[in-house]
C-alpha cells in the first residue's frame, strides 16, 4: 500500500508529492493528460519553433516561493531569466510607470507627488519579505507566524479594499499600475484584501523580479517531476480518475483538482456546493515577426506589460467581466513577452507574445478584435507583426485544464472571503469530510499562482496525519 496518491500533476500536486517523498513517504501521481504541468506547460500552439505557455508565463510567485526555494530545482533544468524590467504600464501619451527591482526607480516613475507615498507603503516590508511571504502563504492553519508584528502591519495595510489603499496616491499613474497588479486575481478592485494582492506582487518584484523560465513554464513542472522521481516517487500520465476505486490503495489521497471534481470523484456529495467560480479570460498566443512596437520605451524591455489607460478603465473592465456578465470594451490586458529575455522561444529574429483580457465565466464570444485594438493603442503597427495567433476563450481553457471551471484560471473566485478562506470557511482547508482525502489545488490557500504552496501546505496536513499513531 502506498502512503499517498496524488491526483493531478500540476505544480501543487507535484509539490505535495515531492514534500511527502522527501520525508520518506511512498507516493504516486496520476495525471489525466499525456504530460505533466497543469497551469505550467509549454507547447507549440501557432507555428513550428514558437514555444508558447498556454497559461502561466511570468512567475513572480514562483521565483519567490518559500517551498520552491528549498528544492534543488536548478539541478533539474529550471533556470529563471530576468528581463531588464519586471513590468511596465504604458499610458496613451507614450510614457509609462514601471515596476522595477528598485523601489526608488518604481516610485520615481509615478512622479514626485506619489513617489514618497509608494516608498512609505512598500519599504517597511522589503527587508522582511521572505519571512512575511512565508507567514502570508502558510496561513491559516499550517504554522504560527514567524514575525506576527510584521504580518499584522501588512494586514492593516492590505486587508481593506485596494480602492482604500490607493487613496494615498494623488495621481493616476500610481493608481493605474497598482490597479493592474490587483487585477491579476481577476476580481473587482473594491474587494476584501485586494490591497494585499497588489502589495504582494509589488514586493515580489522588488525582492526577486518577475522572471520567465528558460524554455517555457513546462520546465518548472519537468524539474519538479524529475526531482520527485529521484526521490522514489512515481508519475503516471494518460490516467483519468473518475472515482476513488480507479486508484491504488493508499493511506491518503490528495487532489490537485477543482472542488467540483473532488466531490464527484470522492463521493463527497454537496460538500462544496457553495464554492464560487469566478470570471474567466480570453487568451491569445502570438507568433510575431519581431518585437511588439510599443510606443513607451520602458515597455520594450519589460517581461510583463499591463495595458489599461487609467485606473477607472481597469476597474470598469473588471466590473464588466465579474459583475455585469459582459465582455469589456476596452478590455484590461495582461501581456507577457518572454522573447525579450529568452530567444530560445522562437526562431531567430521572431518572438512569442501572450495576452489575455477578462471575460465572464463560460463566455463563448471572441475578444480578438477588442484586444488587438487595445494593443494597437499602445503599440501602433502591432497587427503588422502577427504571423499567427492561437485563441482560447473560456470553453477552450476549460477543455485544456479541467480545473478551469468555466474558464476560471484561478480555480475559484478570488473575491470576498473566498480570497482568504477557500474552498470553504474552515481552519483546516486541506481536509475533506473523508478522513483519507485531501485537496491541494489553487482552490486552497494561498490561492492561484505557480508557487506550490497550496501543495506544500496540504502535504504538511497529510504527513501530520500519517505520523499519528
Image (spheres, rainbow, N blue to C red):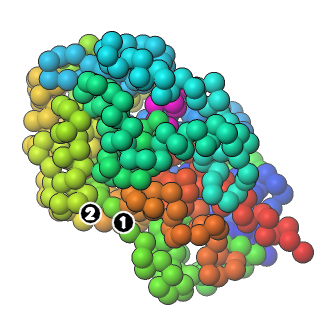
Tags 1 and 2 touching, CB below 8 Å: yes
Would residue 329 appear left or right of 292 to someone viewing this image?
A: left
- Residue 207 among those drawn in magenta: yes
- Residue 276 among those drawn in magenta: no
Q: Which residue is mark 1?
A: 277
Crowding near the residue tagged with mark 1, few <14, some 14–19, many ≥20 C-alpha atoms within 10 Å: many
Q: Position of residue 404 (x, y in %)?
A: 38, 61
Tell which of 398 and 449 is nearer to you. 449
Q: Is residue 222 visible?
A: no
Would residue 348 appear left or right of 383 to someone viewing this image?
A: right
Question: Residue 67: which disc?
Answer: none
Position of 335 relative to 114 (above/below): below
Start-end of magenta stretch: 200-209
Crowding near the residue tagged with mark 2, few <14, some 14–19, many ≥20 C-alpha atoms within 10 Å: many
Q: Which residue is mark 2?
A: 361
Q: Position of residue 192 (x, y in %)?
A: 41, 53
Asked which quadrant contains residue 45, the reply is top left
Asked which quadrant contains residue 20, the reply is bottom right
Amino acid at each position: 500500500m502506498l502512503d499517498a496518491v496524488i491526483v493531478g500533476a500540476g505544480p501543487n500536486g507535484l509539490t505535495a508529492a515531492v514534500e511527502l517523498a522527501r520525508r520518506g513517504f511512498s507516493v504516486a501521481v496520476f495525471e489525466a493528460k499525456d504530460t505533466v504541468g497543469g497551469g505550467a506547460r509549454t507547447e507549440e500552439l501557432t507555428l513550428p519553433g514558437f514555444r508558447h505557455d498556454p497559461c502561466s508565463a511570468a512567475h513572480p510567485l514562483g521565483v519567490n516561493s518559500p517551498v520552491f526555494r528549498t528544492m534543488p530545482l536548478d539541478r533539474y533544468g529550471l533556470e529563471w531569466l530576468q528581463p531588464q524590467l519586471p513590468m511596465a504600464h504604458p499610458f496613451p501619451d507614450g510614457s509609462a510607470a514601471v515596476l522595477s527591482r528598485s523601489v526608488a526607480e518604481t516610485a520615481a516613475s509615478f512622479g514626485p507627488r506619489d513617489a514618497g507615498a509608494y516608498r512609505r507603503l512598500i519599504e517597511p516590508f522589503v527587508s522582511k519579505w521572505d519571512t512575511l511571504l512565508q507567514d502570508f502563504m502558510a496561513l491559516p492553519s499550517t504554522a504560527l507566524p514567524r514575525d506576527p508584528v510584521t504580518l499584522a502591519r501588512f494586514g492593516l495595510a492590505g486587508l481593506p479594499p485596494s480602492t482604500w489603499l490607493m487613496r494615498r496616491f494623488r495621481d493616476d499613474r500610481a493608481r493605474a499600475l497598482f490597479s493592474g497588479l490587483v487585477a491579476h486575481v481577476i476580481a473587482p478592485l473594491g474587494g476584501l484584501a485586494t490591497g494585499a494582492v497588489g502589495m504582494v506582487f509589488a514586493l515580489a518584484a522588488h525582492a526577486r523580479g518577475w522572471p520567465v523560465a528558460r524554455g517555457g513554464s513546462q520546465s518548472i513542472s519537468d524539474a519538479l517531476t524529475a526531482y520527485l522521481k529521484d526521490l522514489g516517487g512515481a508519475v503516471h500520465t494518460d490516467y483519468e480518475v473518475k472515482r476513488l476505486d480507479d486508484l491504488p490503495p493508499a493511506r491518503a489521497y490528495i487532489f490537485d483538482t477543482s472542488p467540483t471534481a473532488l466531490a464527484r470523484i470522492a463521493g463527497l456529495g454537496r460538500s462544496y456546493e457553495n464554492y464560487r467560480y469566478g470570471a474567466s479570460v480570453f487568451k491569445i498566443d502570438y507568433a510575431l515577426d519581431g518585437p511588439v512596437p510599443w510606443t513607451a520605451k520602458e515597455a520594450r524591455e519589460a517581461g510583463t506589460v499591463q495595458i489599461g489607460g487609467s485606473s477607472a478603465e481597469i476597474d470598469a473592465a473588471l466590473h464588466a467581466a465579474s459583475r455585469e456578465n459582459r465582455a469589456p470594451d476596452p478590455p484590461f490586458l495582461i501581456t507577457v513577452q518572454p522573447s525579450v529575455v529568452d530567444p530560445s522561444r522562437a526562431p531567430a529574429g521572431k518572438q512569442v507574445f501572450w495576452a489575455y483580457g477578462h471575460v465572464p465565466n463560460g463566455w463563448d464570444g471572441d475578444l480578438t478584435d477588442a484586444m488587438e485594438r487595445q494593443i494597437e493603442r499602445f503599440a501602433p503597427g502591432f497587427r503588422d507583426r502577427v504571423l499567427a495567433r492561437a485563441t482560447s476563450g473560456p470553453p477552450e481553457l476549460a477543455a485544456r485544464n479541467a480545473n478551469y471551471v468555466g474558464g476560471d484560471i484561478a480555480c475559484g473566485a478570488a473575491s470576498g472571503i473566498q480570497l482568504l478562506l477557500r474552498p470553504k470557511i474552515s481552519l483546516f482547508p486541506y481536509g475533506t469530510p473523508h478522513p483519507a482525502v485531501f485537496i491541494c489545488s489553487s482552490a486552497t490557500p494561498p490561492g492561484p499562482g505557480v508557487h506550490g504552496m497550496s501543495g506544500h501546505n496540504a502535504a504538511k496536513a497529510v504527513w501530520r496525519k500519517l505520523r499519528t499513531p
